[in-house]
Amino acid sequence: MLTPPVTPMLAASVDRLPVGANAYEPKWDGWRVLVFRDADGVYLQSRTGKPLAGYFPEVTRLARTLPPGVVLDGELIIWDAARQRTSFALLQRRVATGSPVREAYRNPAHLVTFDLLEKDGAQLLDRPLPERRAALLATLADAPPQLTVCPQTTDPAEAREWLDAWTAQGVEGLVIKPLRGRYQPGKRGWRKLRRRHTTEAIIAGVIGTLHEPEVLLLARYDVDGRLRYAGRTSPLPPAARRELAPLLTQSGNRRDGRVNHPWPKPLPAGWTGSFDRAGPLEYRQVAPVIVAEVRVDSAYEHTRWRHAVRYERRRADLSVFDVPLIM
């Protein structure tokens, strides 16, 4: 029997819609939540393992309509009627205001469920996705409308329509799940695709110095866990240089005294696609731990952006494992 805390299954970012034996679901702009319904009551757990029931009394009340022995995975969302879309800010207000009951009355939350981890006290983690989905639909067949099941399709064309039509209402993108996949707590066995003109990359090197970075060399991991060169930025404006300089650190040394960095120094011309240059690219290696949001165009091939990209901002809220993979 599952007991909190349980780390939910996670998704790795991708830039293109995977096709194959997959299910596609909307990616909601909300808070991830696990719902534990046992004989003693209801426990709501955040993605990071923190209790949420006190902030969402209306959702706790809804979950009490479920039979004991159920564990759900889903997303808490709040609909902003004025803006006609979901609102992440209204979710955050639940914690900030200290008046969750009042906020629950003014802006009630909904629970969109997309997986069933346990039913009648029996774990379903090793069951394939379609079996878990069928059990979820049966469990919530008579549930209130505020406790609903996430739409799902196996048709990539329909998923693309969702991506085009629903993002204005607050859907961030799509979550892609293998049909044969089991539920693996804490593993990034799913994929997520966001609709956007910006994306994320890892800062793995600079042209200039750590105290005065002029250009960022960007990286992404591939599916085998290798840190691959992905492109370079245009020259950084002064404000960005001042922002990044205190954060950049040189990679440490290994036991043999060599620098602990996966890239050669200098970078071969074949890595950067700069065969017209006189020689390899000189740069300074930095610890690949900082995520940057960059604006890119569609000229992407051979696992890299052909044109210089524009640095937008640092993404302190993301880890390097949230950056889209090179597929």
Image (cartoon, rainbow, N blue to C red):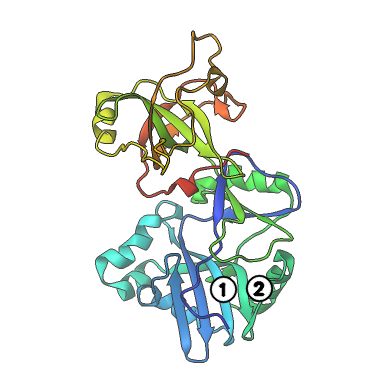
Residue 210 position, x and y percent, is 29, 30
Which residue: 51% across, 69% down? Answer: 111
Q: Which mark is residue 72?
A: 1
Residue 299 position, x and y percent, is 57, 23
Which residue in the structure is indicated by mark 2?
Answer: 136
**Quick one: quadrant of the C terminus?**
top right
Question: Residue extending furthest front?
Answer: 256
Give the secondary structure at mark 2. Answer: helix
The CA span between labels 2 and 1 is 8 Å
Residue 206 position, x and y percent, is 37, 27
Q: Is residue 49 left or right of residue 178?
A: left
Can residue 97 be spotted in the picture?
yes
**Quick one: quadrant of the N terminus?**
bottom right
Give the secondary structure at mark 1. Answer: strand
Residue 157 position, x and y percent, is 72, 44
Q: Residues within 10 Å of mark 2 (few under 14, many from 20)?
A: many
Which residue: 33% across, 67% down? Answer: 94
Q: Are marks 2 and 1 in contact (CB under 8 Å)?
A: yes
Label 2 sits on what residue type?
Leu
